[in-house]
Image (cartoon, helix red, strand yellow):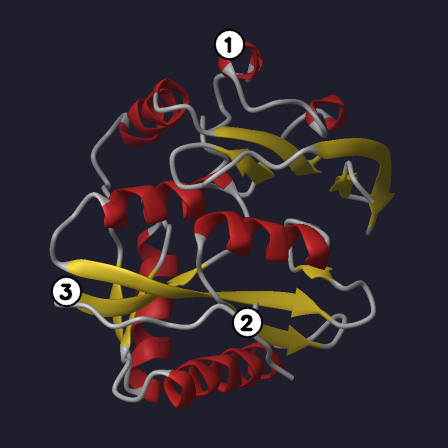
Amino acid sequence: MTATSGIAIDGGARTPCLLSWSGGKDAAWALRTLRARDDFEVVGLVTTLTEGYERIAMQGIRRDILHAQAEACGLPVFEAWMPQRADNAAYEASYAAALAEAQRHRPGLRDIAFGDLFLADIRAYREALCARHGWTPHFPIFDAAPGHTTRVARAMLDAGLRAALTCVDNAQLDAGFSGRAFDDALLADLPPNCDPCGENGEFHTLAYAGPMFAAPLSLHRGESVLRDDRFVYTDFSLASR
């Protein structure tokens, strides 16, 4: 149920850790942040995918794009596969299996980082999940201070991170935003009640360029579809495929 991209995990003097990888801008920014520090070494990515769809859960990112991202980051990816419409128990079981696979490749590995920005309840859930499985969680870009996500969004763009919106919750944001670039124009157009980073689930993204990648990914934008009468997904594929 898990797999890697085939890139070996190398050791280092810093604390080795996994990074929970959604394929979106926040995970990409967390990787960039961790690589700028001298206390951690990211040695792999762990990603939840949905069986049948062959896509990253929530973001809707194709599996081949995930592997292209991992290759551009120079990291292996460990896949946590869960069935469609899985309950939380199924999700946790698949995630635990992926973590165990990572430990088989790197005995003693027990630290994992997440790209959460400010939601305390999500952080508490991840802390409890990690505690049950003997992992230590880290939150390198978490800050509950007012205006944090506005500053993060600006820092992402200034650093050259590029992403596109792959999913929009049309109960919170107009469906027309799906597929748009995460850029200055988007930030200017977002309604006042929308978090600039979509931290409340307003939107999800696909990161394709930035300082965390050796080279940008070339993507083709496809059609947008409505699922579950609420979520508008825009399909992206590798331009070379």
Residue shown at the point (75%, 28%) measured from the top left:
175
Find disc 3 in the rendering and name its residue. 14
* Numbered label attached to residue 6: 2
Residue 172 makes an appearance in the image: no
Query: In the figure, residue 4 lies in which quadrant?
Result: bottom right
Q: Amino acid at mark 3?
A: Arg
Q: Is residue 9 left or right of residue 139?
A: right
Residue 25 makes an appearance in the image: yes
Residue shown at the point (51%, 36%) measured from the top left:
215
Q: Nearer the viewer, residue 152 or 1?
A: 1
Q: Amino acid at mark 2?
A: Gly
Q: Residues within 10 Å of mark 3 (few under 14, many from 20)?
A: few
CA–CA distance in space, label 1 to label 3 = 40 Å
Q: Nearer the viewer, mark 2 or mark 3?
A: 2
* Numbered label attached to residue 116: none
Answer above or below: position of 73 versus 151: below
CA–CA distance in space, label 2 to label 3 = 22 Å
| First of labels 2, 3 by sequence position | 2
Q: Amino acid at mark 1?
A: Ala
| Spot occupied by residue 2 in the image (x, y as percentages of width and height) | 60, 80
CA–CA distance in space, label 2 to label 1 = 41 Å
Dot 2 falls on a residue whose secondary structure is loop
Dot 3 falls on a residue whose secondary structure is loop
Dot 1 falls on a residue whose secondary structure is helix
* Numbered label attached to residue 188: 1
For the C terminus, the quadrant is top right
| First of labels 1, 3 by sequence position | 3
Query: In the figure, residue 55 lies in which quadrant?
Result: bottom right
Q: Residues within 10 Å of mark 1 (few under 14, many from 20)?
A: few
| First of labels 2, 1 by sequence position | 2
